[in-house]
Image (cartoon, helix red, strand yellow):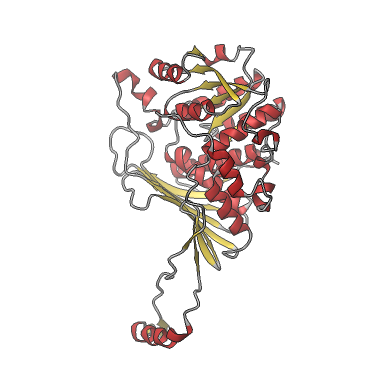
Amino acid sequence: MKELDHSSRREFLKALGIYTGTSLFAASLPWFKVFGSENLKDSVTAGHKVSIGMIGVGSRGRLLLLYLKNNPGVDIVAVCDNYPPNLEKALELTESKAQGFEDYRRMLELKNLDAVVIATPLHEHAHITIDALDAGKHTFCEKAMARTTDDCLNMYNKQKATGKILQIGHQRMFNIKYIQGIERIKNGEIGPVTQIRAYWHRNNNWRRKVPRPELERKINWRLYKEYSCGLMTELAAHQIQVANWILGEYPESVSGAGSINYWNDGREVHDNVALVYTYPSGTQLIYDSLTSNKHYGFEEQILGSKGTYELEIGKMYVEDIPPPPGILQLINNIENSIFETIPLGGASWVPETAVKDKGTYIIDEKLKDDGTDIQMEAFVNSVREGKPIPELLDEGYNASIASLLGYHAIEDRAVVYWPEHLRIV
């Protein structure tokens, strides 16, 4: 795995208008207030480096390690994993400058540790996070927050009790395509948002090779209900967070269905899901995910009365396109000859076809970062200042709870409502 280029941060912030103040929306986001003028310097003055320990250094953890390693304001002082091959690879990436641990509790005893990054299997998130906060360590935890709603609430409450930073890994909040797109949506360019559709389609089974049978559940933890909620916590949590962000609210109820209809390989979690989330405003998020067909990929489609915005590809479509005056009559003639009214039970019906607008790309194609680099930069700067970023934890919490309620709606085959005790002020 090659080292990642950390220099994209400056170009990213320039593109957002953070330097020039041209984007009032981006500049107003609470999670960008940590990018003050001092933090934007290329050099880091002595004594300002942040010491970080990595807990869980599998594929995702190693990626985060590389981002942090290339941050001039960071010292990675420790890495931890209870699977020796992962630990060995992580130590190699730090060029043996970090201490290695198999027990995260021993790592938390280090005096020279400012913060930890947790990228373990989902069922480990809660107790490690709570122990880290109790030990006085600022904490970054990958999404979703936890395996159960009660654990999510316990993590949230522990952050409030300790005052330490707890940031959940939702990188789309730092992705230029999403920030620019949501700014246009908030400005009313597609009219009032009346529906959101989101999907994540893959054609792979998540299964990894296992060197010994007894390691099956340890390595393929995503496939078993004891450790994971499958598609809901691994993928849907990201896109639910985006819907919450756009609507400025979280869902009040959800219904759904799921099954194993392709990967009949002993897994317990569903290989396809479909859900409808209803928000207090009356808007619905229609969501589906599957692992046996990748034709449509993944996308969040935001539908308004004036147009549609597709956030992942950064493209906007308008509902009504004024035709060139010279061909208006020709179009009318063609439409009248093709779409004649058809009597059905005394009424007339005209088939409706999709809007012909092919869309306009909005985003700067040169900026490919998915937001992870800037997300980690924000965490480091927040730790340096010793202050949690306003609203960031709330976004992670609400998205995690919503994904877990969706999981229970599928499991229980019922409409599930947001419980009162899980609401946060």
Q: From what the image shows, is residue 368 above or below residue 214? A: below
Where does residue 183 sit, x and y in percent of width and height? 61, 55
Where does residue 174 sit, x and y in percent of width and height? 57, 42
Looking at the image, residue 339 sits to the left or right of residue 311; the answer is: left
Q: From what the image shows, is residue 41 above or below residue 112? A: below
- Taking depth in this image into account, of 260 and 322 the one nearest to the observer is 322
The image quadrant that residue 400 belongs to is top right
Q: Residue at x 65, y 40 (%)?
A: 31
Looking at the image, residue 152 sits to the left or right of residue 212; the answer is: right
Residue 400 in view, yes or no? no
Q: From what the image shows, is residue 17 above or below residue 226? A: below
Where does residue 162 sit, x and y in percent of width and height? 70, 25
Give the quarter of the figure containing the C terminus. top right
Give the quarter of the figure containing the N terminus. top left
Where does residue 379 sit, x and y in percent of width and height? 61, 32
Residue 211 in view, yes or no? yes
Looking at the image, residue 39 sits to the left or right of residue 283; the answer is: right
Q: Residue at x 58, y 27 (%)?
A: 72
- Taking depth in this image into account, of 18 and 310 the one nearest to the observer is 18
Q: Residue at x 55, y 67 (%)?
A: 305
Looking at the image, residue 325 sits to the left or right of residue 218; the answer is: right
- Taking depth in this image into account, of 403 and 81 the one nearest to the observer is 81
Q: Residue furthest front?
A: 43
